[in-house]
Image (cartoon, helix red, strand yellow):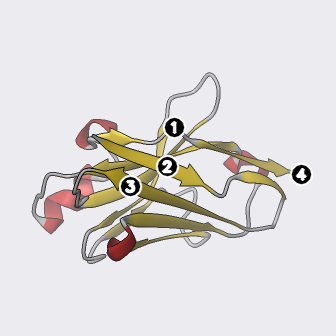
Amino acid sequence: QVNLAEAGGGLVQAGGSLRLSCVASGRTFAAYIMGWFRQVPGKEREFVAGITWAADARKYADSVKDRFSISRDNDKNAVYLQMNSLKPEDTAVYFCAARERVIPVGQAMSSMGLEYEYDYWGQGTQVTVAS
């Protein structure tokens, strides 16, 4: 059993920053891809950012590019999402996801944004950006 636990959500003013973290625990586990998705009530969950094990590939949604940065610490089985210049439209529940199966890096880039490519999901953390 693998558990993903997100932390770092909260309320912030527009233009502010937050740093989300996600730590994987449970059985011995190495996530080849870790990613962040977000969901607003009444809408589908959308991809935010993803990163491979060696951080040799990162991908961002166009809406967050140049504002958000994804990183990971494999020793801690953790992934982070630094969110800067936050906007009210960033308000959502943010989910951490992990894929254990290894695929070529080129394929990883196209897979990162797809929910069904991930094996494990966290419970989510609320991010609210006030205008």
Q: How crowded is mark 2: few (under 14 residues within 10 Å), some or many (20 or more)?
A: some
Q: Badges 1 and 2: C-beta atoms under 8 Å apart?
A: yes
Q: Nearer the viewer, mark 1 or mark 3?
A: 3
Q: Which residue lies furthest to the front in this view?
A: 27
Q: Which label's residue is closer to the chain start, 1 or 2?
A: 2
Q: Position of residue 77 (x, y in %)?
A: 36, 65
Amino acid on which the number 2 mark rests in the picture: Ala
Q: What element carries label 2?
A: strand
Name the image quarter holding residue 33.
bottom left
Q: In this figure, which residue is indicated by the disc labeled 2? A: 5
Name the image quarter holding residue 85.
bottom right
Q: In this figure, which residue is indicated by the disc labeled 3? A: 24
Q: What element carries label 1?
A: loop
Specify the quadrant that holds the N terminus. top left
Amino acid on which the number 1 mark rests in the picture: Gln
Amino acid on which the number 4 mark rests in the picture: Ser
Q: Which of marks 1 and 4 is in front?
A: 1
Gap between marks 2 and 3 measured at Cα: 7 Å
Q: Badges 1 and 4: C-beta atoms under 8 Å apart?
A: no
Q: Nearer the viewer, mark 3 or mark 4?
A: 3
Viewer-nearest residue: 76 or 85? 76
Q: Nearer the viewer, mark 2 or mark 4?
A: 2
Viewer-nearest residue: 58 or 72? 72
